[in-house]
Image (tube, grey):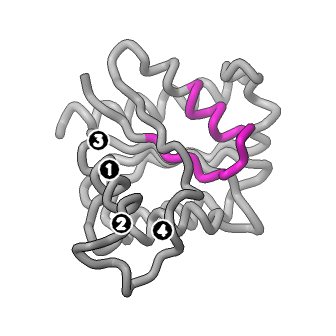
Amino acid sequence: MKKIFAICGSTKASSTNLLYIAAITKLLRHEYEVVTLSSIADLPHFNPDLDTDDAPQSVVQLRKNISLADGILICTPEYAMGLPGSLKNVLDWTVSSASFSRKPVLSIVASSQGEKAYQSLIDVLTVIEARVFPLLVPFAKAKINPEASITDSTTLSAIEATLKQFVANLSNE
């Protein structure tokens, strides 16, 4: 079974983005194992002086989880017209290890608006050489219920179409 490592860009316990990860996990459950990073808040602030062969254990584990996955799912909100700082921190810790290089990444920005974070996420993932499959879900909270079912048919169709492209690239690995 192929493995997908999911990263939620929100640190909020009741995050809408976690609901989207759960909804996507349900859509993929028969063919893919989805493992979600417990919290991006557990990583230390990026510091090049700590980015050595003896990096913090949480960073070593993050890089290992990314490397072992066939693909990555990132689902994030937009904060202050950009990526949440905690998510950018996660991505910064992977630069020197090239963990994302050539890795298929389903990158979803699920937020009120989200255009700035959407473009920023694509830009960062491109710089770190990921193969990006992006999707913007504006007004995200109104399109999913507390049971992690996507209630908006247009959004569900867009997610299914982007997922189809993403998983097709997992098969080519």
Q: Residue at x 26, y 73 (%)?
A: 54
Q: Amino acid at mark 3?
A: Ala
Magenta segment includes 18: yes
Q: Earlier in the sequence, mark 3 or mark 4?
A: 3
Please identify, in this view, whether the residue under mark 3 or under mark 4 is nearer the observer.
Answer: 3
Q: Which mark is residue 69?
A: 3
- Disc 4 and disc 2: Cα gap in Å? 15 Å
| Secondary structure of the residue carrying numbered label 2 | loop
Q: Amino acid at mark 1?
A: Ile
- Which sits in the foreground, 83 or 113? 83
Q: Residue at x 42, y 62 (%)?
A: 125
- Disc 1 and disc 4: Cα gap in Å? 19 Å
Q: Earlier in the sequence, mark 4 or mark 2?
A: 2
Count of picture labels: 4
Residue contact between numbered discs 2 and 1, judged by CB atoms under 8 Å: yes
Q: Residue at x 67, y 42 (%)?
A: 137
- Disc 2 and disc 1: Cα gap in Å? 9 Å
